[in-house]
Amino acid sequence: MSNLQNTSVPKYKRILLKIGGEAFAGPGGIGIVPHLAEEVAAKVKAVRQLGVQVAIVLGAGNWWRGRDGIAHGMDRTTADHIGMLATVMNALALRDAFERMGMGARVQTAIEIRSVAEPYIRLRAIRHLEKERVVILGAGTGNPYFTTDTAGALRAMEVGCNVLIKATKVDGVYDSDPRKNTNAQRYESLTYLEALNLKVGVIDSTAITLCMDNDMPILVLDLWQPNSLERAVLGEKIGTLIQGR
C-alpha cells in the first residue's frame, strides 16, 4: 500500500479510468500478459484503498485495430464489432486479476454476452460502485463508429464520475511527439477548445467534445509512473488536465 494513503483526502469520489489494451500486451504488442493485468489491478487497488470508486473502460489495441481491417477492405461496422468483442477479453482478464487480489469487480458489456458478463445497466453499475466494487465496462458503446475513448467519456457521465482519466504510456499532452522531439513541451492544462485545436492524438476529438458539452474534466497521465493514479485522485499536479476555463 502506498504511503500516500494517509496524507490527504481524495479530490475525486468517483473516477472513470480509460486504459488502452496495450497495457496488457507484452513486447510483441499482442495478447494478454497476466502479470501486466495484475500490475494494472494493483494500481487500481491502491486508489480504491483511498476510498475512491472506480469504473474502467478498456481498449482492444492488444488484439485488434479496426483501421487495419478497414485498410484491407473490411466493412467498418464489422471491424468495430470485432474490436468491441476484443475489449471483453481484456475486461475478463482484469476482473480475474482483481478477484485474485480479494477485490470485488464486475464486468458489464454494451453487447449482451450473458454467459460471461452482465449487460450494461446504468443503475446497476452505479449500485456496484456504491458497494465498492470496481466496474469494468466492456464492448465500448455497443455501436460502431465510436471509439473506446468516446465510450469512456459517455460512461463517465452516465455513472456520475468526477473526472475521466486517460491512462497511457505518455505523461500528458505535448506540443509535439516527445518520442521524436526531445524538446517537446508538456502542457499542464488545456481548455477543451485548445485540445481540439491542437488535434491531440492521445484522446479522440469526439470524446473531448462530449466532455466539453457536459463539463467533464479529462486528465491525461502515464499509468506506469509510480503512484500516478494515487497522486491524481489526491489532486496533485500530474499529467495534463483538460477542462473549461
Image (spheres, rainbow, N blue to C red):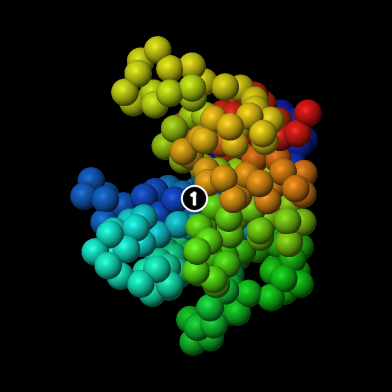
- What kind of residue is marked 1? Ile
Task: Identify the residue position indicated by label 1 in the image.
Answer: 19
| Residue 71 percent location from the top left of the image | 28, 59
Nearest the viewer among 105 and 90 is: 90
Of residues 29 and 38, the one drawn nearer to the viewer in this rendering: 29
Residue found farthest to the bottom: 115
Q: Position of residue 40 (x, y in %)?
A: 46, 49
Q: Nearer the viewer, residue 132 or 232?
A: 232
Position of 206 relative to 174 (above/below): below
Q: Quadrant of the N terminus?
A: top right
Quarter location, residue 227: top right
Q: Is 129 drawn above or below residue 207 in the view shown?
A: below
Image vertical order of residue 229 relative to residue 145, above or below = above
Residue name at image x 64 percent, y 25 percent: 189
Query: Which quarter shows the C terminus?
Result: top right
Task: Please tell me whether mark 1 sits on a helix, a strand or a loop.
Answer: strand
Give the image location of residue 19, x and y in percent. 49, 50
Q: Residue furthest top?
A: 183
> Relative to residue 11, is residue 175 drawn left or right?
left
Q: Is residue 187 visible?
A: yes
Name the quadrant containing residue 205: top right
Q: Is residue 53 left or right of residue 73?
A: right
The answer to whether residue 95 is seen in the rendering is no
The image position of residue 83, as x and y in percent, is 40, 66
Q: Does residue 152 appear left or right of residue 70 in this picture?
A: right
Vertical arrangement, residue 196 with respect to residue 81, above or below = above
Q: Rate crowding at label 1 as few (under 14), some (14 to 19) or many (20 or more) other CA atoms within 10 Å.
A: many
Q: Residue at x 59, y 36 (%)?
A: 196
Q: Tell me which residue sits at (73%, 61%) in the image.
A: 159
Residue that protrudes farthest toward the left in the picture: 28
* Residue depicted at x 24% and y 64%: 72
Say which of 66 and 95 sits in front.
Answer: 66
